[in-house]
Amino acid sequence: MKLNFIKTFVKHESFSGVLLIIATILALVFQNGILSHFYQGILRSEFSIGFREFTLAKPLILWVNDGLMAVFFFVVGLELKREIVEGELSNPRQIALPIIGALGGVICPALIFWGFNYSDEFAIRGWAIPTATDIAFALGVLMLLGNRVPSSLKIFLLTLAIIDDLCAIVIIALFYTTELSTTSLGISFICLIILFILNRLKVNKKSIFLLFTLILWFSVLKSGVHATIAGVLAAFFIPMRDSAGTSMLKDLEKDLHGVTSYFILPIFAFVNAGVSLAGVDPKQLINSVGMGIFFGLFFGKQFGVFLFSFIFIKLGFAKLPEGSNWLQFYGVCILTGIGFTMSLFVGALAYNDSPVFYHADKLAILLASFVAGVVGYIYLFLLCKPKKNID
């Protein structure tokens, strides 16, 4: 009986969120305990691959952020393509509301952050940090509520989070790139052409697609554009149906979903959430960056998603998700303030772990995400009664 419960729990979406929490706690314990030097030594350990001028050497933390996270975005891209082709995003009326909600969830937090930091040219680089929603954490909290929340709201949050990730990808590509290498960009373009041809020919060899995806990742990384973009681009060229009639896209999504949820995201959290609390001054938590992130994530996300959705529905362009009411809908909006992994990721790009905002950005992200998760859960638990056969 216990074994069956564990198997069911592991397969549950909420388990990924639990692993993220454990990884975060471990990172904080390691960084602030007797293992601090060991922890930092691991993060700074350098690994290299390649040969001659094609050698790529990076510390472990960058291998995680540039390499493993590219795999995560590859899976997000696969999921996004599937939803667009035959899922929730294939119907314009179904996708309209989460698109508008996601737009509000990007604009309002960015404006709040800008309001706190407009006068500081370096601080303003982090404007995109509070615009992200963590899919695993947000859905994990929602799943823990079981049948108290209608399935339509779970689908709304998932769709909004996917669109939110797409917005984050575009933001990273446009605002967080370094100097560009035309040679590497040229190689990337050639890889995309090859992937396009393979897609049209419906080649049924995963290894061929993955080989050129790897080359694409390497060339994009060398080009100056953030390497995670390669994951999304490659995903869109994976065929829904190959020459054998099987869905390579769904197979890859199934194969990699567990890897990303139960390994990559927890590892990312472990190497990025280790914030040193030694000598933390409250002023570091209430500076313009910290305040901009906290208020942007916790208040900006929920107000932005709800306000834009409310106006859109009242204008008659959409309806509330089936079986839900405004109170339940607002509770889901609160959960969009869980930024965590995506916000930490953008923060690392914005400030490159600058000592000026080292405590402010990470602690504000952790605090805002924690508050959004707890408040959202309590709100929905108290206001939503469990119903039979609602799912």
Image (spheres, rainbow, N blue to C red):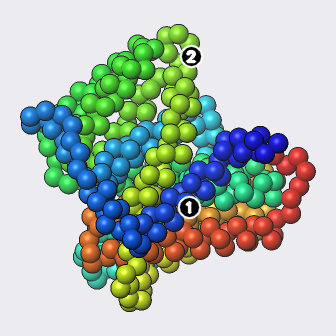
Query: Quick one: 99 or 342, which is closer to the camera?
Result: 342
Compare marks 2 and 1 and give the one earlier in the sequence: 1
Please tell me which residue lies in front, 391 or 19.
Answer: 19
Q: Is residue 133 left or right of residue 179?
A: right
Dot 1 falls on a residue whose secondary structure is helix
Q: Position of residue 35 (x, y in %)?
A: 38, 66
- Distance from the alpha carbon under mark 2 to that under mark 1: 37 Å
Q: Is residue 93 visible?
A: no
* Kind of residue at disc 1: Ile
The residue drawn where x is 42% and y is 66% is 30
Which of these two is toward me, 114 or 354?
Answer: 354
2 or 1: mark nearer the eye: 1
CB contact under 8 Å: marks 2 and 1:
no
Image position of 195 with respect to 131: above or below: above
Quadrant in the picture for residue 86: top right
Q: Which mark is residue 21?
A: 1
Give the quadrant of the N terminus: top right
Query: Based on the displayed image, in which of its 4 quarters is residue 171 positioned?
Result: bottom left
**Which x, y percent locates residue 365?**
46, 70
Q: Give amino acid for label 2.
A: Thr
Q: Which mark is residue 246?
A: 2
Q: Residue at x 21, y 37 (%)?
A: 49
Can residue 384 be seen here? The reply is yes
Q: Residues within 10 Å of mark 1 (few under 14, many from 20)?
A: some
Secondary structure beneath label 2: loop
